[in-house]
Image (cartoon, rainbow, N blue to C red):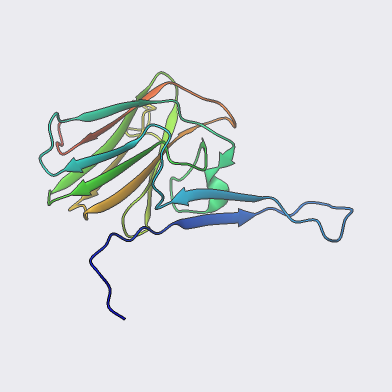
Amino acid sequence: MAVASAALTCALVVATCVQGPTSDAHAQAPTTRLTVGGGRARSGVHPLRAAFTPDPFSTATRPGGAIHVADLRLGAGCRGYVAAEPDAIVRFSGSAPLLRFFVRAATDVTLVIADPSGRFLCNDDAIPGRTTNAMVDVFAPRPGQYDVWIGAHAPSTQVDATLFVTGSRDQRP
């Protein structure tokens, strides 16, 4: 079978099930999911090429949701409450030594990123005791899609936040 050159989009769903008491033997447990690898985000899809300008790139968002990230067991530092759909998608191309994601918000926020290989990178406080804004560094970033969630510390709470993406070590929350 010949295959023409085409883009392939995949969706990975991270799921966790919670079972509670039920009176119906056929009742299903609720499922919590993050949509990874999709084509939609709450504050848009942003293509960035290495050495992009302006640097830092920024986008305003209203993150938060009902999904408790810690329940998903994605890895160390993965916490907060988010929506299933990412707050932003960054489609990175080219080659760079660093891709830094950080958030500025008036309240404490978390950051969860799914990189192009499906690995989760998370942070709560960039500098514990000094800032409650989150930051994740990706060294030698792979080209591809980075799904970004910004989490609130209480369920179904929305906060005003700005996501920044930079190639500079000098930029921080």
Residue 95: x and y, percent? 12, 52
* Residue at the extreme left of the image, as rendered: 51
Residue 106: x and y, percent? 41, 18
Residue 154 relative to residue 9: left or right:
right
User: Considering depth in this image, is 43 or 123 the residue closer to the camera?
Assistant: 43
In the image, what residue occupies the spot 57% across and 42% down? Answer: 68
Residue 123 visible in the displayed image? no
Q: Quadrant of the N terminus?
A: bottom left
Q: Is residue 101 above or below residue 2?
A: above
Q: Quadrant of the C terminus?
A: top left
Residue 151: x and y, percent? 47, 34
Residue 51 relative to residue 100: left or right:
left
Q: Is residue 149 above or below residue 29?
A: above
Residue 117 relative to residue 171: left or right:
right
Give the quadrant of residue 24.
bottom right
Q: Is residue 4 above or below residue 72?
A: below
In the image, what residue occupies the spot 43% across and 30% down? Answer: 109
In the image, what residue occupies the spot 54% across and 46% down? Answer: 70
* Residue at the extreme right of the image, as rendered: 23
* Residue at the extreme bottom of the image, as rendered: 1
Residue 10: x and y, percent? 40, 59
Residue 81 relative to residue 6: left or right:
right
In the image, what residue occupies the spot 50% across and 56% down? Answer: 13
Residue 96 visible in the displayed image? yes
User: Considering depth in this image, is 107 or 163 the residue closer to the camera?
Assistant: 163
